Amino acid sequence: MRKLFLLTGIVCLMSSCIRQELAPCPPLQINVAVKDKNYFNAQDAAEIVGVKDENLPFKDYVSTLYYIITEAETGKIIEERTTFEVTGSEKNYKIILPEDLPYGKYVVTAWGNLKTERPIGDDGAYEDMLSEETLNRDIYVTHDTLDYQVGKEIFYTDLERTRGKLLIQAQNIPDYVNYSAKSISNVFQYVGRKLNYAVAGTVQTDTLWNELNQIQTETLLCPSTSLKESKLKVRFENSQTGNVLTPEDIQITMSRNMLTIVRYVYQEESDDFGIYVFIDDNWEKVHGMEIE
């Protein structure tokens, strides 16, 4: 009996030593990267807008970051960090969860370039893209489910751009023009974390020009509600005298992470405009709302 107790004690002591020598489970690590560093058609329009270097630090594309991590099954919040400024020269942003986080499935949602502390939807679900805080900010989002288990502790998720960009150029404009205004209808107002869109809205912008005849505007817009559904209205005028030049309205299609480029060329002889849209590396003339 004495030998049995002695043997049991030795086994318990060995077990205790082994447990103490075990390293903790590797923590869940989420590497957030930027997928859309350039617009899909940026190469075609390189001479107009240029192409951004795709090997820059994370913060050169996304300067602020918000993220929330929840349990996939229960929705319980594991970690949330309100919008903060990104620093450093790393190409990805690393999120490392506590070592005592149990294995299981988790959901990560991250938003880039927000100005507010968090998106307006619960658990980072959606954002209003026509608010004053988002209208001129290049917002990114990602949403992924991660299966954290033995041997699978490191994950990657890619931020994607939520909107496209409308670029408007004006040429041969009379010297008295120092102001322009435009409206674009039937573009989505809300974007969800899964890049789902809802509610049609209209964007209106006004620009006072300090340099005459150098008229170019850039506007970030969610996708159009359907093909050629967005109506673009533009006017050029003198802010003091009220003299106005008004081109005809045209139908355009805004798409996510795409450049839409429109050029207005004033023709003094006819007091009219030639309107051109940049498509597949070519300028196509628009007439009667349709591309010729």
Image: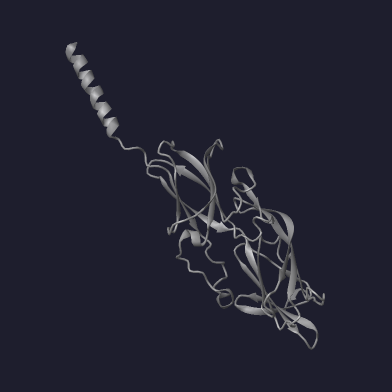
Question: Could you say which quadrant of the image residue 292 lies in?
Answer: bottom right
**281, 110: nearer the viewer:** 110
- State the residue in front, 89 or 197: 89
Residue at position x 53%, y 47% in the image: 67
Question: Does residue 66 appear to the left or right of 152 in the view shown?
Answer: right
Relative to residue 285, is residue 47 drawn left or right?
Answer: left
Q: 207 or 284: nearer the eye?
A: 207
Kindly tell me whether residue 109 is visible in this rendering.
no
Quadrant in which the N terminus is drawn:
top left
Residue 163 seen in the figure: yes
- Could you tell me which residue is drawn at 55 percent across and 74 percent down? 50
Look at 65% across and 47% down and name the residue there. 120
Quarter of image, res 150: top left
Residue sticking out furthest to the bottom: 269
Q: Position of residue 208 (x, y in %)?
A: 71, 71
50 sits to left or right of 190: left
Examine the rendered structure and indicate whether residue 44 appears above or below residue 222: below
Closer to the camera in the image, 243 or 161 = 243
Residue at 45% x, 56% y: name it: 92
On the image, the x and y values in percent for residue 225 come to: 71, 59
Residue furthest toward the top? 1
* On screen, residue 101 above or below 135: above
Estimate the x, y position of residue 234 in percent, counting from the top left.
Answer: 76, 71
User: How is the protein colored in the picture?
Assistant: one colour
Name the quadrant containing residue 255.
bottom right
Q: Residue furthest right?
A: 242
Q: How many marks?
A: 0
